[in-house]
Amino acid sequence: MMLNKPYIDVGFFYNGIKDRFKVNLLSNENGFERRITDQNLHRPGLALAGFVDLFSYSRVQIIGNTEMRYLSKLTNEDRLIALERLFRFPIPCIILTDNNKPLPEMLEFAEKNNVSIFGSTLGTTKLMYFLTDFLDDQFAPSISQHGSFVDVYGVGILFIGDSGIGKSEVALDLVERGHRLVADDMVILTKKGEGILMGTGTQLARHIMEIRGLGFVNVEKMFGIRAIRFQKRLEVIVQLKQLGRGDEDDITRTGLENSLISLLDVELPLVKLPIIPGKNITVISEVIALNYLLKHYGYDPSVDMQERLRIALEKKMRPGRGTDYFEHDFE
Amino acid sequence: MIEKTVRIVNRAGLHVRPASTIVKTAGKYDADFYISHEGYRINGKSIVGVMTLIAPQGAELLLEFSGKDEEIMCREITSLIEGGFGEL
């Protein structure tokens, strides 16, 4: 299910950025209900100067030293015309950078048109960099995925599979062994940049999981702060499945076939794990994480094994014992 | 129980892909399956076992099947090996 935000309101925007990027309110809260529908920023220099074709008025307007200097050089009359032109458009809000103070006319227009003006001590380039990242994140495509999300040795593993197959139980077992729960049941995945998915839980169910037959369990209260984390990059998806007749073909024996799954256009390795009595999924999950790390750092055991066999066939080696001669070593 | 002798015909021999094909095919059946080569007898449902044989082109393998679906299993595995695993 896609969870994209169509807009954020200015009040929410201000709350999110005020402490992070040293932004404060210079006018009043009248404009807090205005909506930001565009993740980009705009510097309205040309609009102030009179050119309003293609003016990106729906973006947050950033006024820096250049715009302030331009306005201050205008005659009183021209300045009013320039500002009137800017405020004629339904802009969401204005942010003055580099500690610039709003001109009295600006505040009047802002009051009259219910637009909030903010100021920041940060320079234009730096503030725009931070705000772009914040807005990108707010407008990033998101989906909710049913599953359990655990950080295993620093590798983000999402367990998926049919209801009741034991995803939460595996997560609980991993937590017990010292790994960290990110989310259970509902995992919200958000695309960050190209090729990165960040996962987190929902506000309501944060680190609460349901164990069949018990009800709710608060993992943070029970296991402490070391057992949880709020967010994690998703790196591997493990699909737990009951093995039926004819499913054999689907289960890799060598690990050479790289099964991939695409979520929000991000391709991730998919491990299909058959659930068989006596099989310890938790330990296998740890091995999946460690194997992922090995592959990430350049070692693939499947390729290694393939290469060993290729060389053995080439050299016409015969099957043989690992140790040729025990040489009086009977220990 | 059925015994059957087959020869590896594909040029590359029993490398990883054919080994995995044998093991996966064997996994569909209930019957026990053993392969003997050069004095080694391994379980045909084990990937490491099959790879350990290091069977090149021309190698002769003795296959043993025992179980209720042994006949059909023997036929499928034999045709895989004699067909060169589709690599001919």
Image: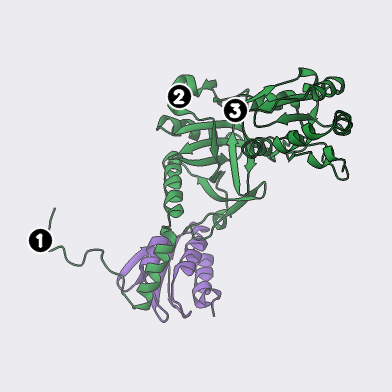
The residue nearer to you, when weighing B28 against B23, is: B23
Residue A302 vertical placement versus A294 (above, below): below
Name which residue type carries label 1.
His
| Residue for point 73% across, 23% down | A11
Find disc 1 in the rendering and name its residue. Answer: A328
In terms of depth relative to the viewer, which is nearer, A10 or B34? A10
Please name the residue that numbered disc 2 is placed on: A225
Instruction: Name the image quarter holding residue A9.
Output: top right
Asked whether disc 1 touches disc 3, contact meaning CB atoms under 8 Å apart, the reply is no
Q: Which chain is disc 2 placed on?
A: A
Q: Choose the circle earlier in sequence order: 3 or 2.
A: 3
Q: Residue at image x 46%, y 20%? A: A222
The foreground one among A304 and B69 is A304
Q: Colour of chain B?
A: purple
Q: Percent from the top left, x then y, of residue A57?
A: 83, 37
Identify which residue is drawn at 43% across, 57% down: A298
Residue type at mark 2 is Ile
Q: Amino acid at mark 3?
A: Arg
In the image, what residue occupies the spot 77% across and 22% down? A32
Within-10-Å neighbours for mark 2: few <14, some 14–19, many 20+:
few
How far from the left and from the top, in percent, is residue A7?
77, 32
Of all chains, the one bearing label 1 is A
Q: Quadrant of residue A36?
A: top right
Q: Is residue A1 visible?
A: no
- Element type where label 1 sits in the image: loop
User: How dense is the environment of label 3, judged by Cα within 10 Å: few (below 14), some, or many (20 and up)?
Assistant: few
Picture disc at residue A20:
3
Q: Spatial distance from mark 3 to mark 2, Cα to Cα?
A: 24 Å
